[in-house]
Amino acid sequence: MDKFESSIAQILEVDEVSLNDELESFDAWDSMTILSIIAFCYDEYNTSLDANEIKSVKTILGLKKLIEGKKLV
């Protein structure tokens, strides 16, 4: 598992995640988790996301693609 996946697993309070996992399926998925993801993206990738952008994606892969797309801008 790469650093992105292990970091997201830590934020979601699980041992590991799969790229196909749906974000809303995690018990820890709430507004505080979204804020943690926003902070993680800023700190790790120097990328700014807002809560609506994160809520618009359904899976871990969708989140990863969102971040990758923002890094190119």
Image (cartoon, rainbow, N blue to C red):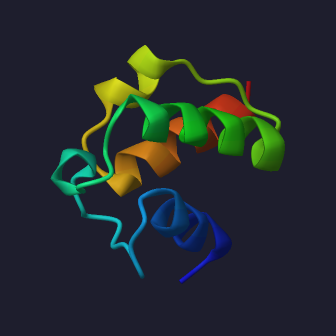
- Tell me the residue at 37%/45% (across/down): 62
Residue 52 position (above or below residue 10)? above
> Which residue corresponds to the image point at 61% horizontal and 33% vertical from the top-left?
38
Q: Is residue 3 left or right of residue 26?
A: right
Q: Quadrant of residue 69?
A: top right
Name the quadrant containing residue 25: bottom left
Question: What residue is drawn where x is 50% and y is 50%?
Answer: 64
Quadrant where the C terminus is found in the figure = top right
In this rendering, position of residue 7 left or right of residue 48 = left
To which quarter of the image does residue 16 belong?
A: bottom left
- In-front residue for pair 39/47: 39
Residue 71 at x, y percent in the picture: 72, 36
Q: Residue at x 74, y 32 (%)?
A: 47
Q: Quick check: 2 above or below 40? A: below
Q: Nearer the viewer, residue 34 or 46?
A: 34
User: How many numbered discs sit on the rendered protein?
Assistant: 0
Using residue 49 as the reference point, say whether residue 21 is left or right of it: left
Q: Nearest the camera: 33 or 50?
A: 33
* Residue 13 place in picture, x, y as percent: 43, 65
The answer to whether residue 54 is above or below residue 61 is above
Left or right position of 67 against 34:
right
